[in-house]
Structure formats: structure tokens, C-alpha cells
Image: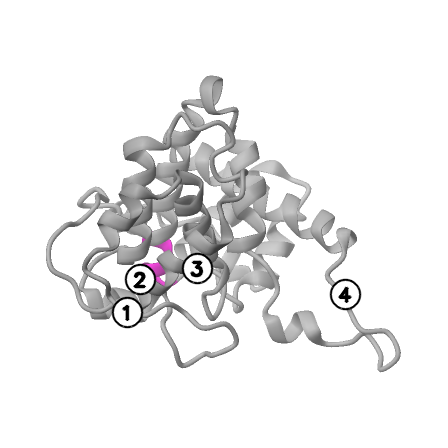
């Protein structure tokens, strides 16, 4: 791992990024483009931010707003699957910039909206924590010294593109509020991290498909999930401790 990525974090830069506080931004927007898997030239977090001139993608803000309005006490929110046809309908509405998307969301089961948010992150051209930094995150999480591990994780997160970091902070702030309702919705931060972790931090699609040798292709099995999920879950929980 590059030493610079695990050096002492620049907390001054961290404070600067978080000022002013994140919030849901309303008002006009440009057309939303849903990301297309496997296409690096399509919508990503940074291009969405430039086009919408907002800190967090419109799709993310809209889904979070609706869930916080009426889904915070829904048992199993983010864990319970929404109706697939509803999720695809909402995805299509965002993709064509349907002006009635807010009305659609208000009439849908909240689990479909949660599913749409998860699908958005899953279909980004690269995960929120980026292909570039995945090996560094994996190595940092493997450090045995907890102090060094937390310092490394903080520094790596601060090294992310600003749009990615701000979107993660916005999502994490929301997930913390969901976890505060754990007594009702049964979703602890650990449970939420288990759901979101593999979506936010995973090997690139190209690396995932590379065979170890021509006769033994790599398959995304339970062993892969057991390896990656704890890493990403730890990352979310670690950041929660550092930030909250």
C-alpha cells in the first residue's frame, strides 16, 4: 500500500469538505441519467454533480427524502426487497426525467424506493469507493493495529473524489438516522452496513471476471461475500465512529 494513503489524515481538509453541512437541495434540476453497467462513459457520481450542480445526485436525494418521510419505522427497511416491477418503473421514470416521479414515489411501497436507491449504487459504472482505491481499502482493513486501521480508513476516505465522499457522507447520515429507529425497524447500523457494504465497496467488474487460470474462472460465491462484506461493513461502521 502506498504510504501516503495511510499517513495521518488531514482533518482540516475534512472540515472544509463538510462546510456547509450537507442537506437535501431542492429546486430545478437537469435531466437524470441512470447509470448503465459496464459503460465507463455514462453517468457517474462526479458527472451527476457537475450536471445537476448539486453536492449529491438527485436520485439519491429524492429516495432518501421519501424514505425519511414515511419509511423510517418500516420493519426491515433496505433489507426487505421491494416489488421488482415498481423498482424498474421508478428507474425508468428517473431516466427520462419524468416530472411526476415524486407523485409516483408517494404512491409506491417504501421498500420499492429503498430498492431503487440500492439499485442506483449497484449500477454505477464503478462503486462509490472507486475501483482505484479498492485494493487500498482492502489492505487497510486488514491492518491488525486498530489505531492504524482507523487512521488509514479516514485518510483513504478523504482521498476519494469529492463528489463520492459527499455522497457517502449524505448516505451515511441517512443510515445513522435509520439505525436510530432500530427498536422499531429492526435495522441496526451493522445490518444496514451488511446491506450496503458490498454495493459501495467491491472489486471492479473487470477484475471480478478475470480467471485465476484459464480452467478456473473466478465465481462470485459465498466465499467472496464472506471476504468482501466484512470489509465494507467495517468501513461503514468505522467511519460512523470517526465521524459521529
Camera-nearest residue between 158 and 47: 47
Disc ID at residue 93: 2
Classify mark 4: residues with Cα within 10 Å, few (<14), some (14-19) or many (20+).
Answer: few
Q: Secondary structure at mark 4?
A: loop
Tell me the distance, in whole angstroms, between the alpha carbons under discs 4 and 2.
33 Å
Residue that carries the numbered disc 1 in the rendered image: 96
| Residue at left offset 29%, top offset 58% | 57
On the image, the x and y values in percent for residue 60 come to: 33, 52
Residue 99 sits in quarter:
bottom left
Q: Secondary structure at mark 1?
A: loop
Residue that carries the numbered disc 3 in the rendered image: 88
Classify mark 2: residues with Cα within 10 Å, few (<14), some (14-19) or many (20+).
Answer: some
Q: Secondary structure at mark 2?
A: helix
Residue 46 sits in quarter:
bottom left
Tell me the distance, in whole angstroms, between the alpha carbons under discs 3 and 2.
9 Å
Residue 176 sits in quarter:
top left
Establish if 160 lies above or below 176.
Answer: below
Numbered circles on residues, count: 4
Q: Secondary structure at mark 3?
A: helix
- Cβ atoms at labels 4 and 2 below 8 Å apart: no
Residue bounds of the magenta highlight? 161-166
On the image, the x and y values in percent for residue 95 come to: 32, 67
| Residue 112 among those drawn in magenta | no
Q: Main secondary structure of the magenta part?
A: helix
Please identify, in this view, whether the residue under mark 4 or under mark 2 is nearer the observer: 2
- Cβ atoms at labels 2 and 1 below 8 Å apart: yes
On the image, the x and y values in percent for residue 21 come to: 21, 42
Going from N to C along the chain, the mark reached first, 3 or 2, is 3
On the image, the x and y values in percent for residue 132 come to: 52, 69
Camera-nearest residue between 104 and 224: 104
Disc ID at residue 219: 4
Tell me the distance, in whole angstroms, between the alpha carbons under discs 3 and 4.
27 Å
Amino acid at each position: 500500500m502506498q504510504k501516503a494513503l495511510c499517513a495521518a489524515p488531514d482533518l482540516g481538509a475534512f472540515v472544509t469538505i463538510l462546510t456547509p453541512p450537507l442537506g437535501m437541495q431542492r429546486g430545478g434540476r437537469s435531466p437524470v441519467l441512470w447509470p448503465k453497467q459496464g459503460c465507463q462513459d455514462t453517468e457517474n457520481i462526479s458527472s451527476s454533480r457537475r450536471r445537476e450542480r448539486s453536492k449529491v445526485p438527485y436520485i439519491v436525494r429524492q429516495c432518501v427524502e421519501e424514505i425519511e418521510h414515511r419509511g423510517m419505522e418500516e420493519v426491515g427497511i433496505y433489507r426487505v426487497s421491494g416489488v421488482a416491477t415498481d423498482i424498474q418503473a421508478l428507474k425508468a421514470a428517473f431516466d427520462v426525467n419524468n416530472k411526476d416521479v415524486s407523485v409516483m414515489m408517494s404512491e409506491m411501497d417504501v421498500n420499492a424506493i429503498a430498492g431503487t436507491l440500492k439499485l442506483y449504487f449497484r449500477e454505477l459504472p464503478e462503486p462509490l469507493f472507486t475501483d482505484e482505491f479498492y485494493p487500498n481499502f482492502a489492505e487497510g482493513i486488514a491492518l491488525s493495529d486498530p489505531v492504524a486501521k482507523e487512521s488509514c480508513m479516514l485518510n483513504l476516505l478523504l482521498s476519494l473524489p469529492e463528489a463520492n465522499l459527499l455522497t457517502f457522507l449524505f448516505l451515511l447520515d441517512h443510515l445513522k438516522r435509520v439505525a436510530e429507529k432500530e427498536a422499531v425497524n429492526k435495522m441496526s447500523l451493522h445490518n444496514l452496513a451488511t446491506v450496503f457494504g458490498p454495493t459501495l465497496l467491491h472489486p471492479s467488474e473487470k477484475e471480478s471476471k478475470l480467471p485465476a487460470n484459464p480452467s478456473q474462472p473466478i465465481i462470485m460465491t459465498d466465499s467472496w461475500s464472506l471476504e468482501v462484506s466484512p470489509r465494507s461493513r467495517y468501513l461503514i461502521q468505522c467511519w460512523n465512529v470517526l465521524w459521529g
